[in-house]
Image (spheres, rainbow, N blue to C red):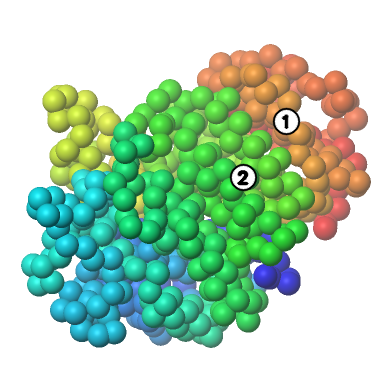
C-alpha cells in the first residue's frame, strides 16, 4: 500500500491536546502550545506526531465524540493554528497523523440530527432499531462505557446503537453513502498534507447481520459480533483502494482483542495489506483482565509472552507498532514499574520496548516518567468510563475500595497536564487548568530533567538515538532468553552487521544475571545502562543494560 514505508524508520510522539501545553492561558491545551514545543519533540529524536482528536466536539468523551470532521475545534486554535503546526512539523522533517474516529459520531453531529428526523439521505446513516414486541431492547449487547448498548431517541421513536458513551452513536458502515462520507473526510485531510491516520476502534465498524443476541460472552455481550465483523476487510480494502493508495500515507488501526495471526489478515505485506500497522492491546494486559479496571498482580511472564508473540508472529510479514503508554491506559511506571524506584524503572521500561522491531510511539509525559494520579474524591475524575465504573460496578464495596479501583484502572491518570516545570500548574498554563495537575510535578518535570544528564528524559533521548543508529534494530532477528523468568526480560536483536543484548530487570531487589551462553560480555560494548556503571555481577533494582557486538554504524 505504501511504497516508501517511511513509517518504519520513525519514532512517533502522541499528543493528547487538552493536556499537552496551553499557549493562550485559558487553561486548555492548544495548538499554539504544540507549536511552541515542536523543537522539544524533535529533540527527543521523535520525527512523527500522532494527534488525538482535534475536531469540534461536545467533549463527552474528550473529543472522541466528533460533531464536525472537517474543522479544528476553536478551543485548540482552529484551522489556521493547525496548518501552522502542520507546516512547522514538516519543516522539521516530522510527519503528522490524525485520529480517524468513524465507528461513531457525536449525537450532536449534523448527520445524526437529520437521521433522527428521517431526513434523506441520512435516515440510515446510523444503526436504528425499534423496541422488541415485549418492549425490550433490540438485543442484549453491552456498551464498553455505559451499561447497555442501546439508547432511546424520542424524536425518531427508535433505539440507536452506541458501543461507547450514550452520546456516541454508531455509524451504519453497511450504508455505502456512509463509506463515501468517510472517504471525503480522508481526502480532505490528506489533501491538506496530513501524513496518515490512527484509526480508532476501526475493527468495530462492521456488525454481524441481524444484530443477534449474544449468549456466549458472560460480560461485554456482543463483542464477538461487532469486532472483526463480516465486512470489515472489504470496507478497509475499499478505503485503501479508493483513497489511501493514491497518497504516500500510513494507516494505524486500533484493534482490541487481536492476535498476531489475525492481524496478518490486514497487514501481511507478502499479500495485499489493507493497513500498515495495528495497535494490539496484549502488552497492556500484564496487570489486568480484559479491562484496566479488573486489576491483577503484574506478571512479567505475561508481558514477555505478548512482546515475543508479536515479534515472532509478524516476522518477515508484517510490521509492529510498539508502545507502552497512550491516552487510554494508566501510567506505565505505576503499573509495570515502581514509584519507589521511579527513575530506574522508568528508564528500564523505555529500554524494554524501544529496541524491539517496529515503530515506537511515546505518549506525552512518558519521557519524564509521569506517574498515576490519586485523587481523594471520585468526583474529581473527568472520564465518562471511569465515572460509570464507580457508580455501577462493585457498589457494595466501601467507597475507599471503589476509589482504589479507579486509581488502578482509570485512564484519567494519563490525562493530567504535562509537567513542564516546577512552577504553578506545572508550567502547563498561566490560567486555571482544565483538569487537575498531578501533585508530584515539582519532583517530576521536564525543566529539572533537562538539567540532569542522568534523567529519564535524557535516557529516552539516548535510547532513541541508539535505535536509529543500529541497523539490527531496524532489520535484525529477535530472540528471547530465560522465558520462564518472572524477574528478567532478556532479548537479542541481530543482523549481519551487529547484535545487541537487551537485559531488563523488573524486580525491586538485586537479581543474579545469567548471561546466555552465546554472548561473551567481555567482547561487547555496554552502550546503555540506567545506573552509573554495570560493574556488578548482579542486576540492581529495575536495572537495564544494552550490550553491542559488531560495528556501530548508522543505517
Residue 26 vs residue 163, the one in the foreground:
163
Q: Callout 1: 10 Å neighbours few (<14), some, many (20+)? A: some
In the rendered image, which residue does mark 2 sit on? 260
Q: Nearer the viewer, mark 2 or mark 1?
A: 2
Task: Tell me where residue 230 appears, x and y as whole percent.
Answer: 47, 58
Judge from the rendering whether residue 377 lies leftward or rightward of residue 546; answer left or right: left
Judge from the rendering whether residue 492 lies leftward or rightward of residue 206; answer left or right: right
Residue 245 vs residue 510, the one in the foreground:
245
Task: Tell me where residue 482 appears, x and y as whole percent.
Answer: 70, 21
In the rendered image, which residue does mark 1 sit on? 480
Q: Callout 2: 10 Å neighbours few (<14), some, many (20+)? A: many
SS of the residue under disc 1: strand
Residue 262 vs residue 189, the one in the foreground:
262
Residue at image x 67%, y 70%? 1
Q: Name the image quarter holding the C terminus.
A: bottom right
Residue 446 vs residue 55, the one in the foreground:
55
Residue at image x 61%, y 31%? 304
Judge from the rendering whether residue 154 lies leftward or rightward of residue 356; answer left or right: left
Indicate which disc residue 207 carries. Answer: none
Judge whether residue 412 can be spotted in this image: no
Q: Work out how far the residue at label 2 is from the one at label 1, CA to CA, in angstroms.
A: 17 Å
Residue at image x 23%, y 66%? 128
In the figure, 347 relative to 423: above or below? above
SS of the residue under disc 2: helix
Residue at the outermost front position? 133
Task: Tell me where residue 206 appears, x and y as whole percent.
Answer: 42, 61
In the figure, 18 relative to 311: above or below? below
Residue at image x 21%, y 46%? 147
In the figure, 403 relative to 237: above or below? above
Amino acid at each position: 500500500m505504501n511504497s516508501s514505508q517511511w513509517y518504519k524508520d520513525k519514532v512517533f510522539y502522541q499528543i493528547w491536546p487538552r493536556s499537552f501545553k496551553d499557549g493562550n492561558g485559558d487553561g486548555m491545551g492548544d495548538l499554539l502550545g504544540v507549536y511552541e514545543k515542536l523543537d522539544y519533540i524533535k529533540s527527543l529524536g521523535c520525527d512523527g506526531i500522532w494527534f488525538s482528536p482535534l475536531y469540534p466536539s461536545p467533549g463527552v468523551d474528550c473529543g472522541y465524540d466528533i460533531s464536525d470532521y472537517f474543522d479544528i475545534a476553536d478551543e485548540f486554535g482552529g484551522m489556521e493554528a493547525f496548518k501552522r503546526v502542520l507546516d512547522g512539523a514538516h519543516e522539521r522533517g516530522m510527519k503528522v497523523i490524525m485520529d480517524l474516529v468513524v465507528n461513531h459520531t457525536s449525537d450532536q453531529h449534523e448527520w445524526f440530527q437529520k437521521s433522527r428526523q428521517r431526513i434523506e439521505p441520512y435516515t440510515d446513516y446510523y444503526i436504528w432499531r425499534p423496541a422488541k414486541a415485549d418492549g425490550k431492547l433490540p438485543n442484549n449487547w453491552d456498551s464498553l462505557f455505559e451499561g447497555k448498548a442501546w439508547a432511546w431517541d424520542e424524536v425518531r421513536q427508535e433505539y440507536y446503537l452506541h458501543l461507547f458513551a450514550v452520546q456516541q452513536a454508531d455509524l451504519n458502515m453497511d450504508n455505502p453513502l456512509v463509506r463515501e462520507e468517510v472517504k471525503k473526510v480522508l481526502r480532505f485531510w490528506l489533501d491538506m498534507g496530513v501524513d496518515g491516520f490512527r484509526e480508532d476502534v476501526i475493527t468495530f465498524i462492521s456488525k454481524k447481520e441481524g444484530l443477534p443476541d449474544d449468549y456466549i460472552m458472560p460480560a461485554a455481550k456482543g463483542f464477538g459480533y461487532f469486532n472483526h465483523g463480516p465486512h470489515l476487510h472489504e470496507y478497509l480494502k475499499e478505503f485503501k483502494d479508493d483513497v489511501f493508495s493514491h497518497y504516500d500515507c500510513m494507516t494505524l488501526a486500533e484493534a482490541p482483542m487481536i492476535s498476531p495471526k489475525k492481524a496478518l489478515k490486514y497487514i501481511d505485506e507478502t499479500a495485499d495489506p489493507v493497513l500498515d500497522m495495528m495497535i494490539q492491546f496484549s502488552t497492556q494486559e500484564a496487570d489486568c483482565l480484559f479491562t484496566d479496571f479488573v486489576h491483577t498482580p503484574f506478571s512479567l511472564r505475561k508481558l514477555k509472552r505478548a512482546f515475543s508473540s508479536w515479534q515472532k508472529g509478524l516476522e518477515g510479514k508484517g510490521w509492529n507498532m510498539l508502545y507502552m503508554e497512550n491516552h487510554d491506559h494508566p501510567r506505565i511506571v505505576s503499573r509495570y514499574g515502581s514509584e519507589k524506584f521511579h527513575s530506574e524503572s522508568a528508564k528500564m521500561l523505555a529500554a524494554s520496548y524501544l529496541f524491539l522491531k517496529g515503530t515506537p510511539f511515546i505518549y506525552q509525559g512518558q519521557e519524564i516518567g509521569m506517574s498515576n494520579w490519586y485523587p481523594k474524591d471520585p468526583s474529581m475524575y473527568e472520564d465518562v468510563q471511569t465515572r460509570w465504573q464507580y457508580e455501577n460496578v462493585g457498589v457494595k464495596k466501601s467507597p475507599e475500595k471503589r476509589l482504589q479501583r479507579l486509581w488502578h484502572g482509570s485512564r484519567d491518570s494519563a490525562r493530567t497536564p504535562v509537567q513542564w516545570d516546577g512552577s504553578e500548574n506545572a508550567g502547563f498554563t498561566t490560567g486555571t487548568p482544565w483538569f487537575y495537575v498531578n501533585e508530584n510535578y515539582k519532583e517530576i518535570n521536564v525543566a529539572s530533567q533537562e538539567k540532569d544528564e542522568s534523567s529519564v528524559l535524557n535516557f529516552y533521548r539516548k535510547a532513541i538515538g541508539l535505535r536509529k543508529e543500529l541497523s539490527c534494530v531496524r532489520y535484525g532477528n529477535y530472540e528471547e532468553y530465560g522465558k520462564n523468568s518472572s524477574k528478567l526480560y532478556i532479548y537479542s536483536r541481530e543482523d549481519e552487521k551487529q547484535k545487541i543484548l537487551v537485559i531488563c530487570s523488573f524486580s525491586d531487589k538485586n537479581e543474579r544475571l545469567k548471561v546466555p551462553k552465546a554472548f561473551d560480555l567481555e567482547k561487547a560494548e555496554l552502550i546503555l545502562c540506567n545506573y552509573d556503571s554495570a560493574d556488578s555481577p548482579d542486576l540492581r533494582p529495575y536495572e537495564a543494560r544494552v550490550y553491542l557486538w559488531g560495528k556501530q554504524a548508522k543505517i
